[in-house]
Image: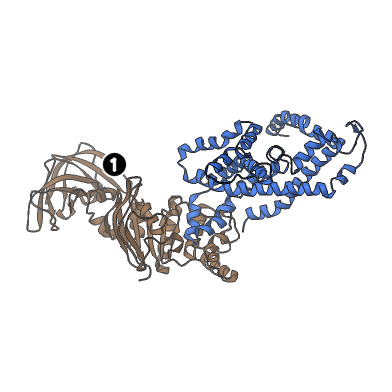
Amino acid sequence: MSRERRTAALLLVPSLLLLLALFYLPQALLFAVSLGRRSAYGGVVRELSLDNYLRAREPLYLGILGRSLALATATTVVCLVAGFPVAWWLARRFPARFRSALVALIVLPLWTSFLVRMYAWIVLLRSEGIVNLALQAAGLPPVELLYNDAAVLIGQVYGELPFMILPLYVSLEKLDGALVEAAADCGASPTRAFESVVVPLALPGITAGCLLVFIPSLGAYLAPDLLGGGRSAYVGSLIQGQFAVARDMPFGAALSFVLSLVVLLLLLVFRRPLRAAQGLR
Amino acid sequence: MRGALAVRNLSKSYRGHPAVRDVTLDIAPGELVTLLGPSGCGKTTLLRLVAGFESPDVGSLSISELDMTSVPPHKRPVNTVFQHYALFPHRSVAGNVGFGLELRGLAPAEIERRVDQALALVRLEGLGGRGVHELSGGQKQRVALARALVLEPELLLLDEPMAALDPKLRHEMRVELKNLQERLGISFLFVTHDQDEALLLSDRIAVMDRGRIEQVDSPEALYERPRTRFVADFLGVQNLFRASVQDVGAGIARVATAGGLRLLAKDDGGYRTGAPVWIGLRAERVSLVERAANVLEGVIDDEIFLGDWTEWRVRTAGETVSVGEGNVLARDRSRGDAVTLWFPPEAVLRLDDGEAPA
């Protein structure tokens, strides 16, 4: 081993230890728990059975998983569509000297606890909330805004949007404007130039943004619980419920592994087309 | 006429700063016209206005006698070779060259045939499968050229295409580009800040300064008869004197420089008695001889060795004059030597200073 490689290996040791102690070890424990069985008083009886995983295949739970996939997909699509123009404008139109200030403004909401921001949405959306008061003042009938799927989507999009904008911004800022002009020069309309030059070159940013939004949204718990009123079950609430309410830790653990597995499978499925789109044509 | 460009009174400002001011320019079909000037003179902006990447504040332009003033770039019959080539990094060489053909909806076999043809034209046969990042600077430039030429533009725009090449390669590419242009018969509008490049390539050169075209002429005419102080200075006229016209007669103008030097100039019809004028004199047109019309006594003040020739700076009673002497003929001179210098009246150039009306 060369000197540089030894130094690099040594520098990796602290973070690897940390990862081992705080991630892999708990994951291993959780996996062991998921193979066990709930005891009469909510404890764990150690076993080596796949019963919990088989139970997760029941239609009830598959339906909940499906709802969560739908929420995560909708959140990702809305964030991408809403975030792209913002990132484009920020990276390519906005005067360079104010850019970092604006990026800071986009990140600013993250300084406040997500929980607090969800309560803020409740204040806005509830039946005597600001939106409905405004509607009333305008002589319009009040609308049921809170405790439904739309409210969950609003909260989720609001929370995840910065994580879409930032990677998009980074990749769009690097994009050479002359390439867009070159596309137009070759006869590409603005739409065609966007499709054939901007999107392929921004793909690393698009991929990163979508992953950063999709994965946390799949296991989202706070927005569904607070804005959805827990009325409609999503995987996040389901898992939380197994640990806190039903006191069925083995089943909760199994569900969280199923969730990880779904993410892993999706990554594998999308890896090929993403690579192809980024590669040579 | 296919390939003709007509620019009429074009102006463009950026936030109050004029970049192109009232420019009128014509290019005949098959002609190679160069926009020459220092950086910031507006030559690239003018090129971008022709390409359609910028829209003018005032004025109009037409290509092949069709008005293009408000036509978007993707609908103009022109193609551009960009300064840093702007090749698509996510496409192969063939993918770059074939991009415009794909957009036109041509059949894959036809695209392949024309891409191969274009690559052969720029001597890159067989490199179609390469990635753009695998190419050298010279090869990238050829790909950019092929990408523009494959679309058979009526007018090809080139924005300092040689700027990123090393000097030896630059010379080769100039010769090659000139041959290609003559063979294809396409009109070229070529932007450069390099006067040697402009003199070598161009049918006509438009010298630009501060957003205006100062003079449009053939390379020979521009070199021999620069009309303004700026053009003379930019094309390397070493001696520039402020002067006034004493009298004009019999085809000869007598001028006196601000330093008190009295010179004879061949009257081109532009000298007016009593009027202020700028006088330019190329160092290589001044000889160190015994007697003649413009005979000046002086002392060698400075010697600048330039390889093939030496520039002597001779302090005369009035101005200090640069004198070029080929080193083949050079005699043994040194600083402080008393010399007499001479130059013919034809060598004395009358120049507008660019402020007074012509």
Pick the front one: A24 or B227: A24
Measured as percent of width and height from the top left, residue A59 is found at 83, 50
Image position of B74 with respect to B258: above or below:
below
Measured as percent of width and height from the top left, residue B232 is found at 25, 50
Measured as percent of width and height from the top left, residue B72 is found at 43, 60
Mark 1 crowd level (few <14, some 14–19, many ≥20, 10 Å Cα): few
User: Which quarter shows the C terminus of chain A?
Assistant: bottom right
Decide if residue A111 is on the left or right side of residue A181: right
Image position of B161 with respect to B182: above or below:
above
Question: What color does chain A have in the rendering?
Answer: blue
The quarter of the picture where residue B199 lies is bottom left
Question: What color does chain B have in the rendering?
Answer: brown
Residue pictured at 43% horizontal, 63% vertical? B76
Is residue B275 in view?
yes
Pick the front one: B156 or A247: A247
Disc 1 is placed on an element classified as: strand
Q: Chain of mark 1?
A: B
User: Which quarter shows the N terminus of chain A?
Assistant: top right
Image position of A195 with respect to A90: above or below:
below
Decide if residue B94 is on the left or right side of residue A262: left
Decide if residue B42 is on the left or right side of residue B119: left
| Residue that numbered label 1 is attached to | B304
Q: Amino acid at mark 1?
A: Ile
The quarter of the picture where residue A23 lies is top right
Measured as percent of width and height from the top left, residue B51 is found at 41, 58
Is residue A50 in view?
no
State the scheme by which the image is colored: by chain
Pick the front one: B55 or B257: B55
